[in-house]
Image (cartoon, coloured by chain):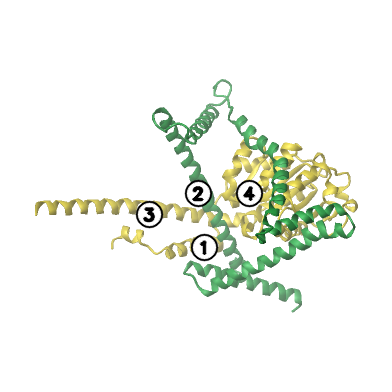
């Protein structure tokens, strides 16, 4: 058996064993589950540390500094400032680094965020309700969209008590919200079952070989 | 204890076993249930079909980690197969450190299925870059400045697929497969700022959040979860893991619907009996 074959086989059985260890939690908490959980946390931390050093810190900071590109001293200093949070006496320095991140992040994001999440969304609710020249089901769809948006917004308007007309519109908004939560729940069930399918397929296909 | 009370007090581990069986049985004995292709999936398929062969490349951003592989890998493979089959050049990148190995594996899996394709000409792996938003803006300004080398360290200037590629004007479409909100950043920067078409494949949990972007035309198409992947596999007529998994998905959904219905019936039946018993008890107290 070559090293590559052995490595593949070992990885396969390790994956199967750890999957079963995690599944054992469905019966009750046990040492096998805790072993797998702790192993995952440790391996993940090690992977992230090594990967981030070789793929982020070294090529983006250490290598440029070795090439005497001194402008990279600024991110180095800001990075060190972030670590000062560990020391209460000088912890305030970390705010400068955080301020830089928030400022630059906001500057990059704010216009496009407003465009895609605010203006475009408002524009898409300005739909024609006139039945002339369009199928009846499109009109019904547009009416539902309009009622859903308006009643949903009224539900989240807290400067007026939800009584009378406002209350009735808000209650319609609740119905739309419930439908939306139901759809999200359905999708969530599908997502979780997909993960189970993935693991069982792995066990039955690669380990047991019945598929 | 009658049947309804048993249902309400049933050990949840029985449900776990039922769900396990409902998943495993269709995997071993396929039912071949039909998969209906939905409009968001068809729209993405059409958009990729409209890209001329051997012209501008597409960027495929593999932004998921092992926790969402069962949902997102099948759709990544399906879209990659479609692009390779149509001879659309593919640039594979990732914005997540944990996605680097998965992106490379997906690309190599599909490339091995198309022996005529060659690395550097038909497809390329640019690896992981930190700072997703800045990378997206960087691609819009100077692609090769943002990616001076590919994921294996080969200079970008030496790769045929990248020759003449400067920014989003030279890219046909960005396709993001993700279990996070990175696709929103692609919309904000690639589409809103630079006008490049964006398509997305997301986990089922996130699909309902992505629909507003589809509705506004900011996404050309959307694949949601395992069902989205299975629908795409059907469109390209290349059944894969998603199609295999959909039988299990359907059976479990039926099981869950039945359990929800039974649970609610049991609740109302036992509450009615409990209420009647309480009324009878109060009546006896009153007469004594």
On the same chain, marks 4 and 3? The answer is yes
CA gap between label 1 and label 4 equals 27 Å
- In the rendered image, is residue A39 in sight? yes
**SS category of the residue bearing label 4:** strand
**SS category of the residue bearing label 3:** helix
B26 vs B165, left or right, is left
Residue, disc 3:
B263
Please report the residue visible at 62 percent of the width from the left and 41 percent of the height from the top: B40
Residue, disc 1:
B25
Residue B209 image-quadrant placement: top right
| Whether residue A136 is situated above or below residue A59 in the rendered picture | above
Q: Earlier in the sequence, mark 1 or mark 4?
A: 1
Which colour is chain B painted?
Answer: yellow
CA gap between label 2 and label 3 equals 17 Å
Residue, disc 4:
B202
Give B154 or B201, whichever is nearer the viewer. B154
CA gap between label 1 and label 3 equals 24 Å
């Amino acid at each position: 058996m070559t090293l590559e074959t052995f490595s593949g086989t070992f990885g396969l059985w390790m994956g199967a064993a750890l999957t079963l260890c995690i599944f054992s939690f469905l019966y009750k908490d046990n040492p096998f589950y805790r072993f797998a959980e702790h192993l995952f946390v440790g391996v993940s931390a090690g992977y992230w540390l090594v990967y981030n050093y070789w793929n982020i810190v070294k090529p983006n900071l250490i290598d440029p500094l070795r090439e005497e590109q001194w402008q990279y001293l600024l991110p180095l200093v800001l990075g060190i400032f972030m670590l000062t949070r560990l020391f209460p006496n000088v912890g305030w320095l970390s705010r400068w680094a955080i301020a830089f991140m928030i400022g630059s992040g906001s500057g990059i994001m704010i216009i496009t965020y407003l465009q895609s999440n605010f203006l475009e969304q408002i524009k898409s609710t300005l739909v024609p309700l006139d039945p002339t020249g369009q199928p009846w089901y499109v009109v019904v769809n547009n009416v539902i969209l309009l009622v859903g948006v308006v009643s949903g917004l009224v539900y989240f308007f807290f400067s007026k008590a939800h009584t009378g007309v406002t209350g009735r519109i808000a209650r319609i908004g609740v119905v739309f919200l419930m439908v939306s939560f139901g759809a999200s729940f359905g999708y969530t069930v599908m997502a979780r079952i997909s993960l189970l399918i993935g693991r069982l397929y792995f066990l039955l296909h690669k380990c047991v070989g019945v598929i | 204890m009658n049947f309804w009370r048993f249902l309400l007090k049933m050990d949840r581990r029985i449900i776990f076993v039922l769900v396990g069986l409902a998943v495993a049985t269709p995997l071993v004995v396929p039912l071949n249930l039909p998969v209906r292709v939905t409009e968001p999936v068809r729209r993405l398929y059409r958009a990729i079909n409209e890209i001329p062969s051997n012209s501008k490349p597409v960027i495929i951003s593999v932004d998921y980690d092992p926790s969402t592989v069962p949902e997102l890998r099948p759709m990544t493979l399906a879209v990659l197969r479609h692009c390779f089959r149509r001879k659309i050049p593919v640039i594979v990148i990732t914005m997540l450190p944990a996605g680097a190995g998965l992106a490379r594996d997906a690309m190599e899996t599909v490339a091995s299925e198309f022996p005529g394709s060659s690395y550097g000409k038909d497809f390329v792996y640019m690896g992981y870059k930190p700072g997703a938003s800045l990378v997206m803006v960087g691609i819009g300004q100077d692609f090769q400045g943002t990616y001076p080398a590919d994921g294996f360290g080969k200079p970008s200037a030496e790769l045929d697929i990248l020759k003449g590629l400067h920014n989003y004007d030279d890219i046909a479409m960005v396709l993001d497969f993700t279990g996070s909100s990175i696709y929103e950043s692609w919309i904000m920067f690639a589409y809103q700022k630079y006008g490049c078409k964006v398509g997305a494949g997301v986990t089922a949990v996130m699909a309902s959040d992505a629909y507003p972007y589809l509705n506004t035309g900011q996404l050309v198409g959307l694949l949601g979860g395992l069902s989205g992947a299975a629908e795409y596999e059907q469109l390209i007529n290349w059944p894969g893991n998603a199609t295999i998994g959909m039988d299990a998905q359907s059976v479990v959904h039926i099981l869950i619907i039945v359990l929800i219905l039974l649970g609610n019936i049991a609740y109302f039946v036992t509450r009615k009996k409990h209420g009647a018993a309480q009324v009878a008890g109060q009546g006896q107290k009153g007469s004594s």
